[in-house]
Amino acid sequence: MTIRRMKASDIGAIQAMAKDRILGSSTLETTLSPLLASAANPEVWVLEENSVILAYLILRLEGTEEEIDEIAVSKNEDRKGYGSRLMNAILRKAEETGVRKMFLEVRRSNAPAIAFYESFGFQCYRTRLHYYSDGEDALCYEKELIQ
């Protein structure tokens, strides 16, 4: 099992996974390429085994803070620990490179994701009302890495 930065040849697999897994995903073809080309310093990390991408995570570095834009695991690979492995690797990398705080947003209705993030020590610090295009609220989470 390998965790590495995304290669251009991975985009199709990531887009397919996002389409299956994430409502309103930003990784659809119209927005993934502009995100990667932007000045927002995006990083896309993948977890793969036998050349098959099982999970991915998109984050943006902004100074000493990082924001997780998306994390997803392949539909057929749920509950096998791949998301946790990827999150642990990203948190370790962030601490090693001096990132002080990580942020993310999650749909209020996404109880499994909320439990996942809270298991890593993320704490909800505010609600963004009607944040998503369908009107659902977003819960904003943060995690202190370096005090």
Image (cartoon, rainbow, N blue to C red):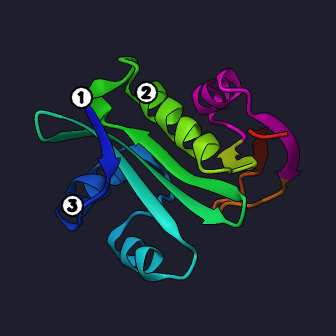
**Going by the image, does 105 lie left or right of 82?**
right
Amino acid type shown at disc 2: Arg
Q: Residue at x 12, y 41 (%)?
A: 51
Q: CA distance from mark 1 to mark 2?
A: 10 Å
Q: Which residues are magenta?
A: 108-127
Report the front residue among 51 and 106: 51
Q: Residues within 10 Å of mark 2 (few under 14, many from 20)?
A: some
Q: Nearer the viewer, mark 3 or mark 2?
A: 2
**Going by the image, does 71 lie left or right of 63?**
left
The x, y position of residue 50, in whole percent, is 11, 33
Q: Residues within 10 Å of mark 3 (few under 14, many from 20)?
A: few
Report the front residue among 44 and 95: 95
Q: Residue furthest right?
A: 126
> How many labels sit on residues?
3
Q: Which residue is mark 1?
A: 1
The disc placed on residue 147 is: none
The x, y position of residue 110, in whole percent, is 62, 35
Q: Which residue is mark 2?
A: 85
Mark 1 or mark 3, earlier in chain: 1
SS category of the residue bearing label 3:
helix
The x, y position of residue 23, in whole percent, is 49, 52
Q: Which residue is mark 3?
A: 12
The N terminus lies in which quarter of the figure? top left
Q: Nearer the viewer, mark 1 or mark 3?
A: 1
Whether 96 is drawn above or below 137: the answer is above
Q: Residue at x 30, y 36 (%)?
A: 74
